[in-house]
Image (cartoon, rainbow, N blue to C red):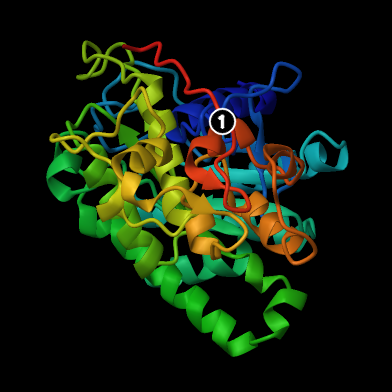
Amino acid sequence: MDIRDRLNLLGQAAQFDDRHSGLFAGAQEPAAAAPDLLPCVSRVQAPGGRSVPVLKVLQTNVCQNNCYYCAFRAGRDIRRSHLAPDELARAFDLMQRAGIVQGIFLSSGIAGTANTMDEMLATAELIRLRYEFRGYMHLKLLPATEPAQVARAIDLADRVSTNLEAPTAERLSALAPKKQMDQLLAPLRTAAELIREDRQAHGPAAQSIGRARLGISTQFVVGPAGESDRELLGTVQTLYHEVRLARAYYSAFTPIRDTPLADAPATDPRREFRLYQADWLLRYYNFAVEELPFDGDGQLSQQVDPKQAWAQAHPERFPIEVNRAPLDDLLRIPGIGPISARAILQARRQARLSSLGDLRRLGARADQAAPYVLLSGHRPPFQMALNLDV
């Protein structure tokens, strides 16, 4: 195969390796290539919120692991390929100079962790040093990546990640019998400590030299291991606190032929949607996992979004007077998010808010908020939504 064929093959393989659909994540980091892009090019949201086309590719799709869900698991009869560091770096440079891509997301199958990780780092070094690329770079940290390799990845990349795939060691064994949870967590913890030390060392200068952009992410396969939403979100909450995770991704399981889970049922994509909504409550709304509205099996409702379900379960907290409520209380109101809550705080310094129109002009979903608010002491008129799922 020529270099273009290998790029496209390993780019398509990267979609299986990192299944960030983005469909239910507020259009965050979609993995599938857009129709007008090459198979090896995807649009991602880089730090700062910009959506940019990136070369999303594996160094190799040869893999020693036999993960039950994976399209390029060891022993599966597929076309295998590999890109040497100089080949991949040169191809990226040509694509970047042609304006096809503005960044790179580099992952790999595992053909010896140390050797494969060294190849990925060599590729990144060529891109940064030989071709002097200063744009977005995301490097995947392979299981059991050595601390020195993690340190070099931090030096080179804007984002590093390791796919945990499951929330606990027991759940992981049902998906990937050769992987060990401590080997997956170790690179993340090393990266977190190095980033913390880096920011302390640079202090206020971190922003000016670009070091403040460093971030860590991870991903979970949702469904086939039998984990609950409570387990997933509990693990993620711990990671947000312990390793300052930038964000987590949730991938609704889709079976792949010729794998041990080929006959397992696909996960309802609504579950992925609700997990992202709950994740945002943890990240931006000051919720804790213990407050989320799980059922007796630890699952979120697929019919009602988790913030709405929480509000319905806590009628004692409402209605809230929007002209006096602190930020944390405003964030608990369905239909009011972080941006509109801060806009409300600013606007009410100038004049009292007295109508749903006032909330609407400030960016709130006023009709959704109406049952839960007071405006200058009065309940606004509202019509209860029909529950079409009953």
Q: Is residue 146 among what the camera can see? A: no
Q: Residue at x 40, y 51 (%)?
A: 162
87 or 227: nearer the viewer:
227
In this rendering, the answer to whether 337 lies above or below 91 is below
Choose top left, top right, bottom left or bottom right for residue 274: top left
303 or 115: nearer the viewer:
303
User: Which residue lies under the disc numbered 1?
Assistant: 31
> On the rendered image, what quadrant is the C terminus found in?
top left
Q: Measuring from the top left, give residue 263's x and y in whole percent.
A: 21, 10
In this rendering, the answer to whether 344 lies above or below 379 is below
Q: Residues within 10 Å of mark 1 (few under 14, many from 20)?
A: many
Q: Residue at x 17, y 31 (%)?
A: 226
**Label 1 element class:** loop
Instruction: Give the residue furthest to the front.
Output: 378
Q: Amino acid at mark 1?
A: Ala
Choose top left, top right, bottom left or bottom right for residue 67: top left
Q: Residue at x 57, y 52 (%)?
A: 377
In this rendering, the answer to whether 140 lies above or below 153 is above
270 or 13: nearer the viewer:
270
Q: Residue at x 38, y 46 (%)?
A: 163
Q: Is residue 278 left or right of residue 355?
A: left
Q: Is residue 113 among what the camera can see? A: yes
Q: Measuring from the top left, give residue 233's x and y in whole percent.
A: 31, 48
314 or 154: nearer the viewer:
314
Q: Measuring from the top left, give residue 298's x and y in whole percent.
A: 19, 38
Q: Is residue 113 left or right of residue 210?
A: left
Instruction: Give the residue furthest to the right.
Output: 98
> On the rendered image, what quadrant is the N terminus found in?
top right
Q: Measuring from the top left, give residue 337's x and y in whole percent.
A: 58, 48
